[in-house]
Image (cartoon, coloured by chain):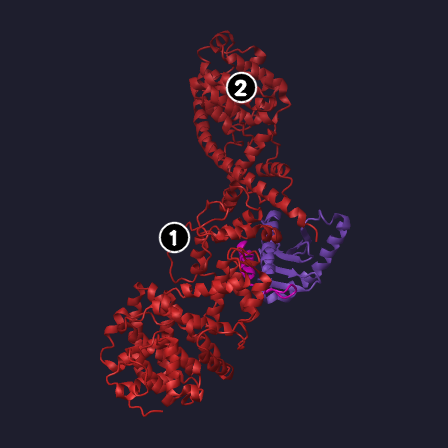
């Protein structure tokens, strides 16, 4: 050992560094690891470091005593100055700048350097200060951490003054880091062959097992990884620098004080500030390392690592199984029991972070998400919540809805491989729903995946389904309506419309035993109307004849059950007398008379029609033209309904069209329809009605010839107009209802299809 | 609302059991235990020939005055038992089915985790979250 004269600043600096490295407070820098890290952070070539070690005598001694440490530091300064390493240079070189070290601990040293070099200049560096290293200290308690913190803070301060420090310089040391980390996976044994500075590692490995069990090895082993975190943060968080600038200020004070308490506070502050960074980001160096590790297990980068191999690999990291299990849950994004390259990198990164003391997040951080399809802006930085992350990778295979995971595994490899291609694709369809509903998305995607890349409609549908799980019952009813329509079933007289629709639904989707609970029936549009008219009926009357026929054909059967046929027209009918008379008239068709008061007119009309049919259409031309026109729509409506089952709608529709066009009394049409539907047995009346409606084409002549309607015209007009208004209102409401129900039906049908496909897939696995 | 969710292994020991009113846990444990007999009865009633067509959802196992117990068996004889509050009359059968389906999905996720040994207690956080959501949703 040469005599070493240090300037005051150097003395202080070296003393600090020694304290920092003296993790065991033994006054001898026993843990070579720390010193080695320091030297690595000095960004010197490894051979230079080796040389320094030799020169200072540490290799001889096997440890860094204080003097050796000081000599080494001085040599580092010499080397950093570009001077050749000579023992003589220790004392001969004057005005040697303090050694600069890069990295978290080195930040502290640099800060120390700044401290010593410019005591008063501590405020200025803060402006561009780099975020302090993430607070991993919270896990590691003890003086070590505090020292490290203090060192770090000083380094942080120094960091600003040493623009040389940059992320780019850090990567070279990361391989060392990872090698160190590898030690851990390999159980801390020294079997792992290490390329590079062998002597470094030998003392390190010796130091490791020998170091205290309180986590010192982990400390030394893991301090490098946070370097990368810091480096990342250096590069990534200029906006946070202002925020973090505050921290170094406080840290600065604390470092000067150098109390444990202050260090802790600084730690916490730093930890908080680090949360603004993205500690979960993987640097290129790390990624490269992960990829290399991946290759050792699975040579094909597009392939995936089976769960068992991954389990063995990560078990080497000596983390508790529970934590490894959680890491797996986070990183196995597609839940297929295997890790793709992205997933593996994420898992490895999480393991490293955990070993460094980071708590595992509840959700996968966004930066660790396997990036497949990025439909959303992944603008969140440093936010460990997986919310955005989920949305950012919508293409990930969704959790399977069905228990047949094996099928997923079978189908997933191809998908995984394809997903390895940058930016794309999985054969997952584009999300229809907002990506914020990622959980649903995951669920749905899994379903889609489980269907082995089902067609887009299916995949699209689950999002819709999930979206519309809470859809109003009306939609469901609508769906059922359409369904019923398609089946052209006649509605049962079930007062519970939903019940009937559900029944129908089940009958149609018999293969899918698990249906979503049918929503409650939609509220009746008009309380006064005891039935809802068919929209098609309305439409059929409102549209052109051509459309009308089509509309007539598309007869939505979703009409609430009509009141019992035996019920007479209610008292709220405008003309109860007439209704009754009509009823009396149409004794043969009592059922045609709707009970709803509003439709009393129609019933009257129907009855009238029936009666008129019976009576040979005794309508007057002028006075009863209105009535007739009203009647006709009703008749045609009734006939439409009838024809829905009988297929005679077209005629009636055609007949009713001119009437409707002439009068616009479409609203009148729907009401009679339900009655018609229920009264299939009333065929006798239908023909009459049909005849009547058919005759409407010859209205004028017929009207003239027909006998007068058994009711006053004035009353009729008023009643008709009132009922027209009411029915128009009903019409609009029902039109809306219809559209909703139709949409709902589509969704339900799609869901049913998907469920059926799932069931088909489940069949092979139904026995174990 | 599900007040208690339990996952029972093939050998009829619990892999996971959690109830919402945490003070009456023992009562729910006992209920789930007794319901296992009903589950076995239902399974055996199907007969071996019907194993393929046996539906996973068993339906209402038995009702009591306070709550109802529903059961679900997977093909590997892992049973899911759910106890729901009787006062929640709006809970339809389909909703129960969907809840069991979610349970089954989460269970398969847990099984896929290579660090999970079949037969261990389930400690998965994702599984816990799912069960929590199920217990809270129908409140």
Disc 1 marks which residue?
A377
Of the image marks 1 and 2, the number of the one nearer the N terminus: 1
> What colour is chain B?
purple
Alpha-carbon neighbours of circle 2 within 10 Å: few (<14), some, or many (≥20)? many
Q: Position of residue A611 (x, y in %)?
A: 57, 15
Dot 2: element: helix
Which residue occupies the foreground of this view, B133 or A463? A463
Q: Position of residue A64 (x, y in %)?
A: 41, 87
Image mark 1: chain: A
The part of the image, by quadrant, that contains residue A29 is bottom left
Quadrant occupied by the N terminus of chain A: bottom left
Q: Is residue A526 left or right of residue B58?
A: left
As drawn, A235 above or below A687? below
In this orientation, does residue A631 appear?
no
Q: Position of residue A368 (x, y in %)?
A: 45, 60
Disc 2 marks which residue?
A650
As drawn, A273 above or below A74? above
In this orientation, does residue A451 appear?
yes
Residue at horizontal 56%, vertical 10%? A616
Dot 1: element: loop
Residue at horizontal 48%, vertical 70%? A354
Compute the Cα span from label 1 to label 2.
54 Å
Q: Which residues are magenta?
A: B113-139
The part of the image, by quadrant, that contains residue A506 is top right
Q: Position of residue A586 (x, y in %)?
A: 59, 18
Do marks 1 and 2 share a subunit? yes
Residue at horizontal 76%, vertical 53%? B44
Residue B39 shown in magenta: no
> What colour is chain A?
red
Which residue occupies the foreground of this view, A569 or A753? A753
Image mark 2: chain: A
Q: Are marks 1 and 2 in contact (CB under 8 Å)?
A: no
């Amino acid at each position: 050992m040469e005599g070493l004269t240090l300037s005051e600043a150097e003395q202080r600096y070296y003393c600090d560094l020694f304290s920092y490295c003296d993790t065991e407070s033994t006054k001898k820098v026993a843990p070579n690891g720390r010193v080695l890290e320091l030297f690595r952070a000095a960004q010197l070539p490894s051979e230079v470091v080796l040389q320094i070690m030799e020169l200072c005598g540490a290799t001889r001694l096997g440890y860094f005593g204080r003097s050796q440490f000081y000599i080494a530091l001085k040599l580092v300064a010499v080397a950093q100055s570009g001077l050749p390493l000579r023992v003589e240079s220790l004392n001969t070189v004057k005005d040697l700048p303090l050694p600069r070290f890069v990295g978290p601990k080195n930040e502290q040293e640099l800060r120390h350097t700044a401290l010593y070099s410019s005591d008063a200049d501590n405020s200025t560096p803060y402006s561009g200060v780099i975020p302090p290293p993430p607070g991993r200290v919270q896990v590691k308690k003890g003086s070590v951490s505090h020292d490290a913190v203090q060192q770090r803070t000083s380094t942080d301060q120094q960091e600003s003054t040493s623009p040389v420090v940059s992320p780019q310089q850090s990567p070279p040391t990361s391989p060392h880091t990872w090698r160190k980390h590898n030690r851990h996976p390999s159980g801390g044994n020294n079997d792992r062959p290490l390329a590079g500075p062998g002597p470094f590692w030998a003392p390190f490995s010796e130091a490791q097992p020998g170091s205290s069990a309180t986590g010192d090895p982990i400390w030394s082993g893991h301090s490098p990884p946070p370097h990368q975190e810091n480096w990342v943060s250096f590069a990534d968080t200029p906006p946070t620098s202002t925020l973090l600038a505050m921290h170094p200020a406080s840290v600065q004070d604390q470092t000067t004080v150098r109390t444990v308490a202050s260090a802790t506070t600084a730690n916490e502050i730093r930890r908080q500030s680090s949360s603004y960074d993205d500690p979960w980001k993987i640097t290129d160096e790390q990624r490269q390392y992960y990829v290399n590790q991946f290759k050792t297990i699975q040579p094909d980068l597009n392939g995936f690592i089976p769960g068992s191999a991954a389990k063995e690999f990560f078990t080497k990291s000596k983390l508790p199984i529970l934590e490894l299990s959680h890491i797996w849950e986070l990183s196995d994004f597609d839940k297929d029991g295997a890790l793709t390259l992205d997933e593996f990198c994420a898992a490895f990164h999480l393991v490293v972070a955990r070993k460094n003391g980071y708590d595992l997040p509840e959700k996968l951080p966004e930066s660790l998400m396997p990036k497949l399809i990025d439909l959303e802006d992944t603008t969140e930085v440093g936010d460990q919540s997986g919310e955005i992350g989920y949305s950012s990778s919508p293409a990930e295979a969704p959790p399977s809805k069905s228990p047949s995971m094996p099928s997923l595994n079978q189908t997933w490899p191809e998908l995984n491989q394809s997903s390895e291609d940058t930016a794309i694709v999985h054969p997952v369809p584009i999300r229809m729903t907002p990506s914020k509903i990622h959980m649903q998305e995951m669920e749905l995607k899994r379903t889609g995946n489980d269907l082995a890349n089902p067609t887009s409609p299916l995949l699209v549908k689950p999002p819709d389904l999930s979206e519309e799980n809470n859809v109003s019952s009306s939609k469901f009813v609508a769906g059922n309506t359409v369904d019923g329509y398609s089946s052209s079933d006649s509605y049962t007289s079930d007062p519970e419309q939903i019940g009937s629709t559900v029944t129908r639904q089940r009958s149609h989707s018999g293969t899918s035993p698990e249906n979503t609970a049918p929503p409650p029936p939609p509220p009746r549009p008009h309380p006064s109307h005891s039935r809802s008219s068919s929209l098609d009926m309305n439409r059929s009357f409102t549209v052109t004849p051509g459309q009308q026929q089509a509309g007539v054909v598309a007869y939505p059967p979703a009409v609430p059950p009509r009141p019992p046929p035996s019920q007479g027209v209610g008292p709220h009918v405008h003309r109860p007398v007439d209704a009754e008379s009509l009823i009396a008239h149409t004794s043969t068709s009592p059922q045609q008379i709707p009970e709803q008061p509003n439709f009393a007119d129609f019933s009257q009309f129907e009855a009238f029609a029936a009666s008129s049919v019976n009576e040979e259409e005794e309508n007057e031309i002028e006075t009863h033209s209105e009535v007739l026109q009203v009647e006709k729509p009703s008749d045609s409506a009734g006939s439409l309904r009838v024809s829905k089952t009988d297929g005679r709608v077209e005629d009636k529709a055609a007949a009713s069209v001119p009437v409707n066009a002439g009068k616009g009394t479409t609203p009148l049409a729907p009401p009679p329809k339900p009655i018609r539907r229920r009264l299939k047995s009333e065929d006798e009346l239908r023909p009459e009605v049909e005849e009547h409606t058919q005759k409407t084409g010859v209205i004028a002549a017929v009207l003239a010839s027909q006998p007068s309607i058994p009711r006053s015209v004035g009353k009729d007009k008023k009643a008709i107009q009132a009922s027209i208004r009411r029915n128009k209102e009903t019409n609009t409401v029902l039109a809306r209802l219809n559209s909703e129900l139709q949409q709902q039906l589509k969704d339900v049908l799609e869901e049913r299809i998907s469920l059926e496909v799932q069931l088909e897939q489940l069949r092979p696995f139904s026995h174990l | 609302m599900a007040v208690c969710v339990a996952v029972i292994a093939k050998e009829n020991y619990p892999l996971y059991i959690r109830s919402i009113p945490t003070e009456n846990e023992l009562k729910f444990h006992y209920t789930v235990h007794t319901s296992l007999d009903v589950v076995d009865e239902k399974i055996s009633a199907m007969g071996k020939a019907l194993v393929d067509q046996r539906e996973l959802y068993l339906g209402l196992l038995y009702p009591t005055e306070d709550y109802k117990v529903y059961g679900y068996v997977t093909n590997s004889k892992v049973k899911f038992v759910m106890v729901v509050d009787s006062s929640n009359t709006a809970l339809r059968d389909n909703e129960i089915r969907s809840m069991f389906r979610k349970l089954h999905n989460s269970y398969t996720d847990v099984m896929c985790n290579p660090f999970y040994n079949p037969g261990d207690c389930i400690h998965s956080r994702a599984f816990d979250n799912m069960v929590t959501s199920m217990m809270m949703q129908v409140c």
